[in-house]
Amino acid sequence: MTTVKATITILALGAFGNISVKAADKISVTARGFSFSQIHPEREKFGHLLWSGGLVLKSNYKKFGGFSGVETSTDGKKVLMISDRGYWLKADFAFKNGKINGLKHAKMAPILNQYGKKFVSWQADSEGLTKRNQSLDDVIISVENSQAIYNFKFENPTLNANAKEWGFIKDAGKISQNRGLEGITTLPRNHKYRGWLLTTAERSLSANGHHSAWLVHGKQSLPLYITRYDGFDITDITHLPNGDLIILERAVSLLEGPRMQVRQICGTNVKPQALIRGKILLNANWLYGTDNMEGIAAHRASNGQTILTMISDNNFHFLQRNLLMQFALANEKSICN
């Protein structure tokens, strides 16, 4: 195990909606490597995924944590995260022997509302994150409590960008505030609904017990459904270079602890009123490196592998961790074939 210290630049630490952006603060973050299998640490294949490394991230800075959404640059060298307390974290990955082993040139800033102020707490529950035009400077987030969707365009390195409403869910008031919009992704370039978003609720179930999802474009929202397996809730969704999509799911119980599931779905199956099942790539319980897994992103590495990057939300609780982990797809083919 190695410990890596990175310097994090914290921008704009306003705690309430009417406090303006403050000067930068710097904090120290430690990154400790871990193996996904606690019993067989040398093991590399898990289900249909190949382990590519993981980090436990810690910091004494009180705003660090609660990471619920993640995106990576197209080359996989940079990462952007959102905290459900309403903060951005952007950094460059540090690598050793081809695997992530730390963060460098990192910075944090509050997510700003349309007036350039930090969102008040009940509006700051940012959960889903996706990039547009393959750029980390043009991103969209979903907010769980208010069921809102915002676009942010960063024009400078300070992460100061005002929110702009991007889309709306029809009958959003019927969605449970604490089980609302959790995952969001743009759709692949060759998709019939290219330019639309796919957003998923954590646990908003249909009469038949299926997860609710929506195709969204501005004021248009078209419903579809995703089968629910074994009590899992959906925490995030992303699309793959091959046109398929990946769903990250989480379940927690006193008897079984935290569990995670990764599911691949055929991209062409994503259409209004569809019921989507997909293929389970990974199902892991407390015996593995799982926690409160909430964010997932995908990029294609220089060697041609598709890399999934996942993060966990520690809920600012001493018994939970900020985990950052990566897997590669064992099979690059679309499951549509």
Image (cartoon, rainbow, N blue to C red):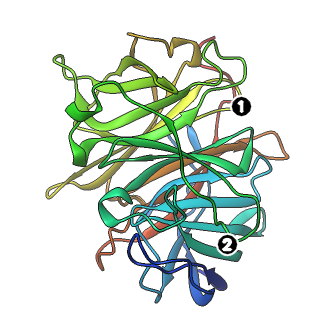
| Residue at 29% over, 32% down | 172
Q: Position of residue 109 (x, y in %)?
A: 57, 72
Give the numbered dot on residue 241: 1
Q: Position of residue 61 (x, y in %)?
A: 47, 87
Which residue bears the numbered disc 2?
101
Q: Quadrant of residue 92?
A: bottom right
Name the amino acid type tagged 1. Answer: Pro
* Left or right side of 132 for 29: left
Q: Position of residue 125 (x, y in %)?
A: 36, 57
**Relative to residue 56, is residue 301 depicted above or below?**
above
Is residue 199 visible in the rendered image? The answer is yes
Quarter of the image where the C terminus is located: top right
**Relative to residue 224, is residue 239 depicted above or below?**
below
How far separated are the C-alphas under marks 2 and 1? 25 Å
**Viewer-closest of 319 and 134:** 134
Graded by Cα atoms within 10 Å as few (under 14), some (14 to 19) or many (20 or more), the crowding at tag 1 reads some
How many numbered tags mark residues here? 2
Quarter of the image where the N terminus is located: bottom right
Sequence-wise first label, 2 or 1: 2
| Residue at 59% over, 74% down | 108
Give the numbered dot on residue 152: none
Graded by Cα atoms within 10 Å as few (under 14), some (14 to 19) or many (20 or more), the crowding at tag 2 reads many
**Viewer-closest of 90 and 147:** 147
Marks 2, 1: nearer the viewer: 1
